[in-house]
Image (cartoon, rainbow, N blue to C red):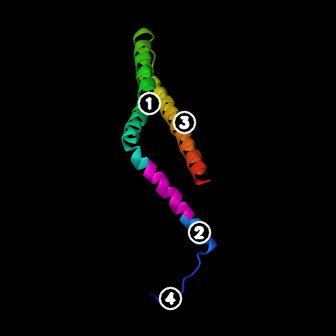
Amino acid sequence: MSDQPKMRPTQSETGFSRKVGVKAARKLRAQQDNPEVVWTGLSVMGLIGWSIVVPTLLGAALGHWLDAHYPMSHSWTLTLIMMGLSLGCWNAWHWVKMENRSVREEQEHDDA
């Protein structure tokens, strides 16, 4: 037997233990759902990519058509590509921000 006296855990140690337990449980759930998480991650990357590519390509197509039918001193194609790219990036950023908020709310619900 040990000659060291047993010490009672302090309030901060029990709080820390609870946080570690919650995070460990979350990690175990994530490992159990691993195949779905991989496909979900790939679909999210695809969704973000397409949300940028589609407005950019639409801007390029419309700009090309405008350049062919209404020539100007500036390039409609380049202008609308940049506008489509900006719109697509904003759309992707907005979507990622919403997903991040959803994940944080789920974590806070799990922590409570």
**Spatial distance from mark 4 to mark 1, Cα to Cα?**
63 Å
Q: Which residues are magenta?
A: 18-29
Q: Residues within 10 Å of mark 1 (few under 14, many from 20)?
A: many
- Image x and y of residue 24, in percent: 47, 57
Q: Residue furthest bottom?
A: 3
Q: Dot 2: what SS?
A: helix
Q: Amino acid at mark 4?
A: Gln
Q: Which residue is mark 4?
A: 4
Q: Secondary structure at mark 1?
A: helix
Q: Name the amino acid type tagged 3.
A: His
At x 57% / y 43%, what residue is drawn? Answer: 101
Please identify, in this view, whether the residue under mark 3 or under mark 2 is nearer the observer. 2
Q: Amino acid at mark 2?
A: Thr
Q: Can you tell which quarter of the image residue 58 is in? A: top left
Q: Earlier in the sequence, mark 2 or mark 1?
A: 2
Residue drawn 61% across the image and 71% down it: 12
Q: Nearer the viewer, residue 23 or 97?
A: 23
Q: Residues within 10 Å of mark 4 (few under 14, many from 20)?
A: few
Find out whether the residues at labels 3 and 2 contact each other: C-beta distance under 8 Å. no
Residue 102 visible to the viewer: yes
Task: Judge the density around disc 2: few (<14), some (14-19), many (≥20) Cα neighbours within 10 Å.
Answer: few
Q: Which residue is mark 1?
A: 52
